[in-house]
Amino acid sequence: MRVTVGATTDGKQRRSEVGLGGYPAVTLQQARDKAREVREKIAQGIDPIAERKAARSALMASRASEITFEEAAGQYIAAKSPEWKNAKHAQQWNNTLETYAFPFIGKLQVRDIDTPHVLEVLEPIWKVKTETASRVRGRIEAVLDWATVRKYRSGTNPARWKGYLDTMLPEPTKVAKNGNHAALPFVEIAQFMRHLRKMEGNGARALEFTILTAARSGEVRGATWDEIDLEAKEWTIPAERMKMGKEHRVPLTDEAVALLKALPRLEDSNLVFFAPRGGELSDMTLAAVVKRMHEAETKAGRKGYIDPKQTGKDGQPKVVTPHGFRSTFRDWAAEQTDHPREVAEMALAHSIDSKVEAHYRRGDLFQKRRALMEDWAGYCAR
């Protein structure tokens, strides 16, 4: 049904038809009521056709600006991933948000996300998984910043730290001790290594190699044979596999070389340490080796492999972690040797805090690091 109405624009009379809906969805009485409303609006100087167009335009604009946090995160990751140094970085972003953020805010429109929503994500993990929680906060902030620039939301970013969340949550560095990787006291490393060398499997050998090189477990698990020169006793980790995005040479001790030479190899794989069904070992594999060793010790009536300086929620000392052996190495180097601090830091592939020092130091102290790692291997084999 349609009604013909007249409207005056710029002193000129024009006539238009306004649709009222079709029968039987709209009854005759309803059509009459709608026609009356249209004429009343015209009498008030309102153009019903222009009003409908404006309402339709507003609706379309509103729908165009609708995007959930999960959708925004996907678009942000797709836009930024080409500039990330590691192809796995995008997957890490998605996994972190999928685990911690999406269950709370994934389906929310980004324009509706506010402080209570962000705190709902962060507060349960802030004190128990501080490093992870801090990373999640930063990623939520980045996605919401992207959404603001794209006009999907406006106002203050509720995930911003400085001057905002820092007034509601404790400083990460103040609670980070609760989230540090549990480390074995260095005086117990020789006993641990004797036990470890009795363990079978690529997971045990990967953990042993991790300790001997003071490398990150991810660097070891992803190691390939073309990165290793057994004759020169060197392992060169390419920049894309390093946390700092810089190539890192690792001096290999006689113990590390002997370990490598004794490893089995797969014809169709270049991985040094591979899973039983092929492919890269998981980080949980190395952690499982430590767990089995710890349980064997406790069953024998001994205290096991624990970090006496860290306790879990149950108040009991934490079982050491694969990553914690880097702290074991660092504590040993500082307290038991005369090797310079910068040599130990470079062995761990840590960044140089001083920008000036970083600018002028071009070498990698390789020979000095070789001496340090030989001393470490000797200490582990006491």
Image (cartoon, rainbow, N blue to C red):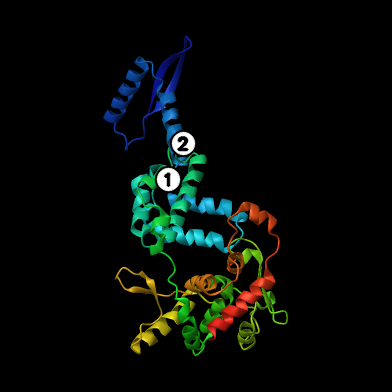
Name, please, the residue furthest toward the right.
Answer: 231
Q: 191 or 265: nearer the eye? A: 191
Specify few, some or many for label 1: CA neighbours under 10 Å numbering under 14, 14-19, or 20 or more: many
The amino acid type found where label 1 is placed reads Val
Give me the disc on residue 370: none
Secondary structure beneath dot 2 equals helix
Residue 314 placement (x, y as % from top left)? 29, 71
Q: Secondary structure at mark 1?
A: helix
Residue 277 visible: no
Instruction: Say if mark 2 contacts mark 1, CB within 8 Å.
Output: no
Mark 2 vs mark 1, CA separation in Å = 16 Å
Q: Residue at x 56, y 64 (%)?
A: 88
Quadrant into which the N terminus falls: top left
Could you say which disc has been placed on residue 110 in the image? Answer: 1
Residue 265: quadrant of the picture = bottom right
Residue drawn at the location 52% of the way across and 40% of the way down: 149
For label 2, the residue is: 61
Viewer-closest of 20 and 157: 157
Furthest-front residue in view? 338
- Is the residue 315 above or below the residue 107 in the image? below
Q: Position of residue 211 (x, y in %)?
A: 54, 77
Q: Nearer the viewer, mark 2 or mark 1?
A: 1
Tell which of 73 and 324 is nearer to you.
Answer: 324
Residue farthest toward the top in the current orientation of the protein? 11
Q: Is residue 177 above or below residue 221?
A: above
Mark positioned earlier in the residue sequence (2 or 1): 2
Decide: few, some or many residues near mark 2? Use Cα within 10 Å; few <14, some 14-19, many ≥20. Answer: few
Q: Position of residue 28 (x, y in %)?
A: 29, 30
Regarding residue 256, the answer to whether it shows in the image is yes
Residue under the image location 61 percent in, 76 percent down: 373
